[in-house]
Image (cartoon, rainbow, N blue to C red):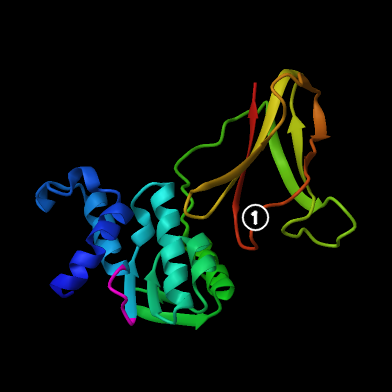
Amino acid sequence: MRHSEIAAEVESIIDFAGVRDHIDFPVKKYSSGMYLRLGFSIAAHLDPDILLLDEMLAVGDATFQEKCLNRIDELREAGHTIVFITHDLAALTRLCDRALLVENGKLVMSGSPRKIIDEYLTMGFANQELSDTLEAPTERLAECRRISFIPGDSNETVRTGYPMIARPDYHASKVLANVEFKISIYWPSGYLCSELATATDSHITLHPGLGTVEFYCPVLPFQPGLYRVDVSRIQ
């Protein structure tokens, strides 16, 4: 950037990065987050033809990340080319028109973000190793035998934005009083997306044998994809 360009943009760069209180400190004193925020702010004000962003949204708080997303949207609308390297699937869906799936430096496939995300999640599940070092308890007071997700309206399948019923089937070996049930839903990466839980004052009592609990979700907020589901009982 020419000195005149820097002079014209420097205040905007500082404000965007949120480092005004530290702008006179030596950069070597910056945290990695501050350094990357300032770096992105400079790059975003360069008016580049091609902008490369590598895991940019991994730093900063939610407010700064939203500013980054809005700035990227502005650059896209202005016709700039953006190459966005990320594991943030939500940001990928929002920002990208085309996605490339790369593993060990080799191109696996390319296509729409939705198609690539589905393949990426499928690969994650396939590569997940299940530990067999833990021994199962000899007797379980209660265990989940199956969990079903069914439409909560007239739809034939569970759909984003529509009602859904989650129905875990369990087996209890004895009477259990004051029981709570919780369903936790995760991305394959381990990020907790949502939880469904019975009310703490519901005072559910389980009797020996098979039983079912129903959770009604009026609007399913999840995007299509693969998720990991855990069911737990609290007493």
x then y, percent, for residue 21: 22, 42
Q: Quadrant of the N terminus?
A: bottom left
x then y, percent, for residue 189: 47, 54
Return the residue at label 1: 222
Decide: is 200 above or below 4: above
Q: Quadrant of the C terminus?
A: top right
Decide: is 73 above or below 176: below
The magenta span reads 45-49
Q: Nearer the viewer, residue 196 or 22?
A: 22
Badge 1: how crowded within 10 Å, few (<14), some, or many (20+)?
few
Along the horizontal axis of the image, is 109 left or right of 48? right
Q: Residue at x 38, y 76 (%)?
A: 83
Decide: is 74 above or below 170: below
Along the horizontal axis of the image, is 109 left or right of 7? right
Decide: is 101 above or below 91: below
Q: In the displayed image of the protein, which residue is found farthest to the right?
A: 154
User: Tag 1: residue type?
Assistant: Phe
Along the horizontal axis of the image, is 123 left or right of 169? left
Q: Please identify the quarter of the rendering in which residue 37 is found.
A: bottom left
Q: Please identify the quarter of the rendering in which residue 38 is found.
A: bottom left
Q: Residue at x 48, y 62 (%)?
A: 91
Magenta region, main secondary structure = loop
Residue 47 is covered by the magenta coloring:
yes
x then y, percent, for residue 65: 41, 54
Q: Residue at x 48, y 46 (%)?
A: 132
Q: Please identify the quarter of the rendering in which residue 5 is found.
A: bottom left
x then y, percent, for residue 76: 45, 76
Q: Residue at x 52, y 60 (%)?
A: 90
